[in-house]
Image: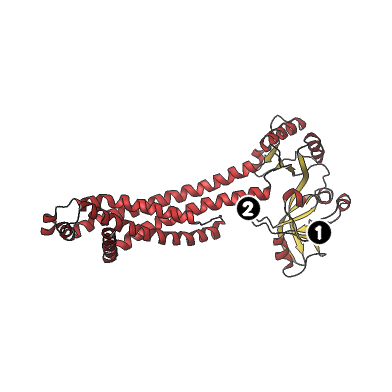
Amino acid sequence: MAKFSGILKESLTAVRSFKLRTFFSVIGIAFGIASLSIIVAAVEGAFKRAYEVVESFGPESILIFGGSQEQKGIRTRQKTLTIYDIDQLKKAFPEIKIIMPIVRVRTKVYYRGNVEETRLYGVDTNFEEAWSWYLLEGRMFTDQELKRKENLCIIGKYIKETLFKYEDPLGKSIILNRLPCKVIGVLSERGTTPTGRNLDNRVLMPYTTVMYKINHDPVYISSIRIRYYPEVDLNNVVKETKRFLTMRHHARKDDFFILSPTEILDFLVALTGTLILFLGFSSTISLSIGGFVLANLFLLSVSERRKEIGIRKALGAKKRDILVQFVTEAVMITSIGAVLGFILGFFGAKLLKKIVEFPVHFSLEGFLIALAVSFIVGVLSSLNPALKAANLNPIEAIRS
């Protein structure tokens, strides 16, 4: 123990003495560890966000869009889903707990000279339960108001803040597609999607009002929201739903697209993978450069410290002691680099989150991974110089 304590003190003295070598080595390692820390934080954040998104979407839910996936790629949607599909699906699948038509319209909302581009969604009275998305204030429209196609709306939190500022929106009238609409509720905040779309920039109306008074189309709808009972086999019911709708629409190819939690997770994994690939490449280069700089500086250090090494060996130091000292010095330097890199990574991740709104999550595990990598880099980089130092002939070293 006393010997190890002595080696530790010698290593610390050497790290302090060779300040320029320590500085360049620490900087090289720090940049590599910073990139690695961001990768680990991004992976943890992405998976955390993925499960949050799936939870808010509904693990036992699906969303059926009109039009094929190819049409989605070119940003067009053919009208293929009808209001009659709702009744037929409900009859065919007893596993369905809630089924709701959605009519989507991009439009502008006006209030006393203020204007905001938004998404208008025609929904029914089951919206809160269908999406587990509840009202912050006000109320949902009733079944009777839905049947009467009343001009009522519920606004997202973003619309409330941009159009009404500090004014109470309840009871006020806004204009949507030249249609005056009375605000009866405000949705709770949902934030943004992984792709950066603001979920709070929306307005809800009875789907009957949107279909008859805005779209002037009593048949076609944009999408169908289905929530199943918790015990359902989601993958199996999705396959059955696809088969049922394809037969019902007499289509050779699917003229609709089903979004389920599986597709959401696949998309988020692909999105995360792109970032990880880029950061992983940059962190590998940074750590390789840091390790290369460290190895060369230690080789130089062996030449500069030949006399010191020779005297220590002449006084009884063993090869193992010299080897351990050089490796300990390297590990000390890389550990300092790891701490500095983790701090740089923390602030770099905050900047990344601000620029691209990508979720990051720092944890103790991430810091321990950074320390472990820095330890491995330190050992591997210093091993060759340490072996050269340990194998020096003490007499020749002192003469030099």
In-image side of 254 versus 98 (left or right): left
| Residue appearing at x 43%, y 48% in the figure | 281
In this figure, what is the number of numbered marks?
2
Query: Which label lies toward us, 1 or 2?
Result: 1
Image quadrant occupied by the C terminus: bottom left
Q: Which of 378 and 275 lies nearest the eye of the viewer?
A: 378
| Residue appearing at x 76%, y 47% in the figure | 102
Q: Which of 224 and 249 lies nearest the eye of the viewer?
A: 224
**What percent of the width, then of the height, locates residue 103?**
77, 47
**Circle number at residue 193:** 2
**What percent of the width, then of the height, locates residue 246?**
73, 32
Q: From where the camera sits, is residue 73 visible?
A: no
Residue lying at the far front of the rendered structure: 1
**Type of amino acid at the residue the image marks with label 1:** Arg
**What percent of the width, then of the height, locates residue 247?**
75, 30
Vertical side of 113 occupied by 363: above or below: above
**Circle number at residue 271:** none
Q: Provide the secondary structure element on which disc 2 rests.
A: loop
Q: From where the camera sits, is residue 175 visible?
A: yes
Query: Which residue is label 1 attached to?
Result: 139
**What percent of the width, then of the height, locates residue 134?**
74, 56
**Type of amino acid at the residue the image marks with label 2:** Thr
Q: CA distance from mark 1 to mark 2?
A: 25 Å
In-image side of 239 versus 355 (left or right): right
Q: Are circles 1 and 2 on residues that touch, CB within 8 Å?
A: no
Q: Provide the secondary structure element on which disc 1 rests.
A: loop
Other residues around mark 1 within 10 Å, as few (<14) / some (14–19) / many (≥20): some
| Residue appearing at x 42%, y 52% in the figure | 283
Image quadrant occupied by the N terminus: bottom left
Closer to the N terminus: mark 1 or mark 2?
Answer: 1
Other residues around mark 2 within 10 Å, as few (<14) / some (14–19) / many (≥20): few
